[in-house]
Amino acid sequence: MPLQVVRVESVRHAVAILAAEGGARFLGGGTLVMRDVNAGDTTIDTLVLPDGLGLDRIAIDGAQATIGASVSMADIPRHPALAFLKPVAGAIGGPAIRSMATVGGNLFAPYPHGDFAVALLALGAAATIEDLDGTRTVDLEDFFKNRATRGIVRDVRFVLPPGGAFRFVKIVRRKPHGASVLSIAALLPVVAGKMSGARIAYGAMAATPMRARSVEAAIEGQPLDKTTIAAAARVAADGCAPLTDPQASDWYRLNVLPVHLARLLAKQP
Amino acid sequence: MARVPVTFTVNGDEQAEFIAPGALLADVLRDKLGLTATKIGCAQGTCGACTVLVDGELKLSCLIPAERVEGASIETLEGLAKNGAPLHPVQAAFAENFAAQCGFCTSGMILAAKTLLDRNQEPDRAAVVDAISGNICRCTGYEPIIAAILAAAAEMRGRKSA
């Protein structure tokens, strides 16, 4: 099956090709689409290359961070303003995968992958999407409700968290970089000793990355002490619907989640 | 089927080939250029047997259409000791430490190790484990490989200070 590889002059050009040709796929780092190609997915007949379009830029404007969709996991910790995301980007595959896998692609990673997207969800990020109708900004929580877009993610944007307010843990069975049993990202800003604007996101606890709203409600306005953490752990699994896969069963994920959440919240920053 | 032209540098030599559209870099290296050190294990980005360097970055050549690396500089295991040159210290350490059994993962392992040592002259065990975490070995149990990489690091430091 011949596979056409197309270089485009602009994101708009790429959008037009993707809209016109059902067999066309946007090729990010290749760690998702090329797997499908190699597995014999004959519905793919065209690969659209984003190379040279400038989607690999990181821009920091005050507290506002904009990460281009083609920025790789290896690029993230090299930027001083994004060093706090090193535990996330560094947890995704070995060095070769990290130099290929992109931020944009991670938003589309199938279960149980997508740990960087989990961090972005906790950070309250939004994606800039370009499609035939123009450019729009979509909150990631809405984005995950319907990922079947024919548009292209140009970048993700979020406000940099206060120092020490971001925490992340990824639980794997194959050390050091297996696929997730689960992952948890937490934004825990403190104002006058109490949680203010806390956001918690889970990976592999539902078909897509999800917010842990019950946990957020349990800790908001509270000091992050033993009582609060115990209350958070009690509602940790609210709204979760994990799957069973080679990493873990749904039952196991539901049962270990409160333990890992409590440990993450109790961790001294 | 129409062929498409690609031009890139492999181990310092410029290569120009006509390839099938969409052909994988790994296949072009092996079948067109005869550089069979690069292996294809899983073709899913999981095993690391197809690891090469593209413009100095570790990449998996089974997940790259060759047309994507037009103009790029590729380095494969064959480039480490060309034309009978002495083995690279990582290659020598793999031989001395029995770090290869069947050899299928070895090319990728050595390139991953060399990339680590190019950037970090004093890696600890955790850094070595991270460096080869994308390369699966089903023979050795990894310990001889880790020992070989740590030995190569010491050897390279010794040469530098000598």
Image (tube, rainbow, N blue to C red):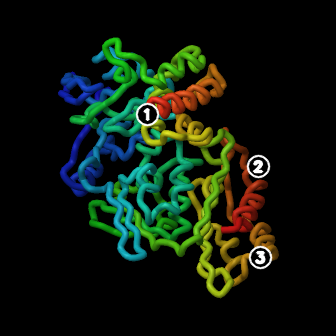
Q: From what the image shows, is residue B118 above or below residue A256?
A: above
Q: Residue at x 68, y 60 (%)?
A: A240
Label 3 resides on the chain identified as A
Q: Residue at x 53, y 52 (%)?
A: A114
Closer to the camera in the image, A251 or B91: B91
Q: From what the image shows, is residue B8 above or below residue A262?
A: above
User: SS at mark 2?
Assistant: helix
Name the residue tied to disc 2.
A252
Q: Is residue A132 left or right of residue B153?
A: left
Q: Position of residue A123 (x, y in %)?
A: 52, 69
> Does residue A209 appear anywhere in the picture?
yes
Label 1 resides on the chain identified as B
Closer to the camera in the image, B111 or A228: B111
Label 2 resides on the chain identified as A
Amino acid under disc 2: Tyr
Name the residue tied to disc 1.
B160
Q: Position of residue A243 (x, y in %)?
A: 66, 48
Neighbor class of circle 1 (other Cα within 10 Å; few <14, some 14-19, many 20+) is: few
Q: Give how far apart the Cα atoms at labels 2 and 1 are.
A: 51 Å
Amino acid under disc 3: Asp
Closer to the camera in the image, B29 or B128: B128
**Of circles 2 and 1, which is in front?**
1
Name the residue tied to disc 3.
A225
> In which quadrant will I find the N terminus of chain B?
top left
Q: From what the image shows, is residue A100 above or below residue A237?
A: above
